[in-house]
Image (cartoon, rainbow, N blue to C red):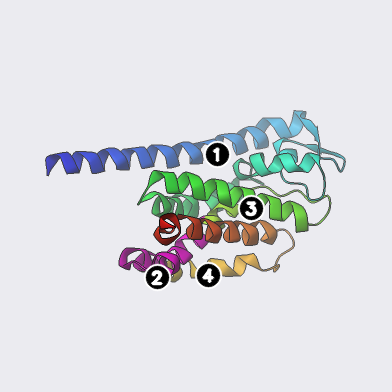
Amino acid sequence: MKQNLQAISGELKTQVKILAGLVATFWIIVILNEVLLENILVISTGCGLRRGLNALGIVPHSFIGLRGILFAPFLHGGFYHVLANTVPFVVLGWFVMLRNMKDFYFVSVMSALVGGLGTWLVGRPCSVHVGASGVIFGYFGYLLFRGYFEKSFVAIAISIAIAIGYGGMIWGVLPTRSYISWEGHLFGFIGGVIAAKLLSPSKTAQ
């Protein structure tokens, strides 16, 4: 019993460290960018020059803009943007890593890749897309569809809980506001659904 508690405690500490480390990275980058780098750093986006690190975001249809698939999840458009992403990233990210830490890494990468590439393909030319919301929508899609693919009681219960608590997020995949990257949300969500399918036990067994 004591060993089990120690193992759970150790795993929880690891989860907290990973999530806290990623969130701290988001905040450090946005602080540096807002306070210092936007005033002194100029970077080519493939569609002209742009100030600050956000020039490294996804720029649709621009070859150099492909680098944003790697960098965009760590960049944000300001303090309000990173604040709005912090809580859902921590909550949904923790639900993803509950069963297995490897799931968290896989879902994160799949959401970033599918979300980033989809945004690059269909986004408006010369727009710049940044933020962790594509990955967050990936977590949302994964958790929502994990119950459907696994058909286990725990997975279904988590899917229902996520649908109740965060179901309103689904509207974020629609082009409702010009300043919100609905493309990143939509394709990140699709990436999460793909990850749920690939990680389902039935698929693994095959």
Between marks 3 and 4, how big is the CA–CA gap? 22 Å
Magenta stretch: includes residue 142:
yes
User: Which is closer to the viewer, label 1 or label 2?
Assistant: 2
Image point (43%, 59%), residue name: 200
Sequence-wise, which precedes: disc 4 or disc 2? 2
Front residue (pair 179, 13) = 13
Front residue (pair 187, 178) = 187
Q: Residues within 10 Å of mark 2 (few under 14, many from 20)?
A: some
Above or below residue 111? Residue 150 is below
Query: Could one spot residue 132 in this view of the protein?
Result: no
Residue at which label 2 appears: 160
User: Which is closer to the viewer, label 1 or label 3?
Assistant: 3
Q: Residue furthest left?
A: 1
Sequence-wise, which precedes: disc 1 or disc 2? 1
Residue 27 is tagged as: 1
Q: Residues within 10 Å of mark 3 (few under 14, many from 20)?
A: many
Picture quarter with the C terminus = bottom left
Residue at which label 3 appears: 114
SS for tag 3? helix
Sequence-wise, which precedes: disc 3 or disc 4? 3
- The range drawn in magenta is 139-162
The reply to whether discs 4 and 2 touch (Cβ–Cβ < 8 Å) is no
Q: Give the amino acid type for the residue marked by disc 4 in the picture.
A: Gly
Image point (30%, 41%), residue name: 11
SS for tag 4? helix
Residue 168 is tagged as: 4
Q: Residues within 10 Å of mark 1 (few under 14, many from 20)?
A: some
SS assignment for the magenta stretch, majority: helix
Between marks 2 and 3, how big is the CA–CA gap? 25 Å
Between marks 4 and 2, how big is the CA–CA gap? 13 Å
SS for tag 2? helix
